[in-house]
Amino acid sequence: MSNVFIIGANGKVGRQVAKQLSGSNHDVRVGLRSKEQFADFEALGATPVALDLEHDVASIQDAIQGSDIVIFTAGSGGHTGADKTILIDLDGAAKSVAAAEGIQASQFIMVSALNADSPETWSDSMKPYYVAKHYADRLLRESSLAYTILRPGGLTDEAGTGAVTTDPASTDETTIAREDVARVVVASIGQESAYHQTIPLLTGDTAVAELFA
């Protein structure tokens, strides 16, 4: 059993991760900014913890204390401006990495974005988002943590297929269901074969269960 902490649990991917971990043998805690969200996650068997990514590293470290696995699925969302994107997707991620180092977490799982290392593909409107993901990933790779960086393509709310590809060049697919991204997050927990890996994700033909076997 691992002590798992989900940062950004109220987001669509984070909520899927919490659902899929419900009833597992993991002790799951979720970081939430609003106490109004606590009841939903308590119903899933998770323990809510107050967490605001705009607070300092010490506050985040206090919140995640005792966790083995830290999962970062937070994002400012498409309805916010570039300022919030930088504050949450970059600065919030950087502080979370520092906090995880502070507690000597055994694994940090980052949900990033496909093409985060390919600036030639970034549109002007999405550039702040990709800049944030690019540098957050770099900070994580340069940290002392055993990291797993997952880079999904366009996210959909469709039911997942349970199968993915990690080779974008092998497919014409450009999207993946959030449910399947969450499946990969859960499958990677505690898997040494997932450590120090940066993994593209799109809908494909490889069963999620086989990815880290």
Image: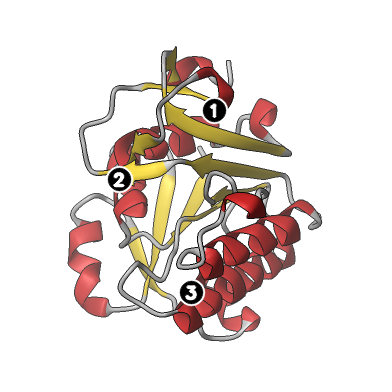
Residue neighbourhood size for the residue with mark 1, other residues' Cα within 10 Å, grouped as few (<14), some (14–19), many (≥20) = some
Which secondary structure, mark 1?
helix
Which secondary structure, mark 2?
helix
Quadrant of residue 204 within the rendered picture? top left
Residue neighbourhood size for the residue with mark 2, other residues' Cα within 10 Å, grouped as few (<14), some (14–19), many (≥20) = many
Vertical placement of residue 108 versus 8, above or below: above
Please name the amino acid that badge 1 sits on.
Pro
In the rendered image, residue 50, in percent from the top left (x then y), is placed at 39, 76
First in sequence: mark 1 vs mark 3: 3
Judge by depth and name the residue closer to the eye, 66 or 16: 16
In the rendered image, residue 173, in percent from the top left (x then y), is placed at 40, 27
How far apart are the alpha carbons under marks 1 and 3?
Answer: 26 Å
Q: Residue at x 55, y 42 (%)?
A: 150
Q: Indicate left or right for 29 with 132 as reference.
A: left
Placement of the C terminus among the 4 image quadrants = top right
Vertical placement of residue 36 versus 7, above or below: below
Q: Using the image, tell me which numbered label, if any, was put on residue 168.
A: 1
Quadrant of residue 180 within the rendered picture? top left
Q: Using the image, tell me which numbered label, if any, was put on residue 16.
A: 2
Q: Residue at x 53, y 86 (%)?
A: 55
In the rendered image, residue 71, in percent from the top left (x then y), is placed at 51, 52
Residue under pointer 3:
85
Please name the amino acid that badge 3 sits on.
Thr
First in sequence: mark 1 vs mark 2: 2
Judge by depth and name the residue closer to the eye, 141 or 156: 156
Q: Residue at x 65, y 58 (%)?
A: 134
Q: Using the image, tell me which numbered label, if any, was put on residue 133.
A: none
Vertical placement of residue 50 versus 11, above or below: below
How far apart are the alpha carbons under marks 2 and 3?
Answer: 22 Å
How many marks are shown on the rendered structure? 3
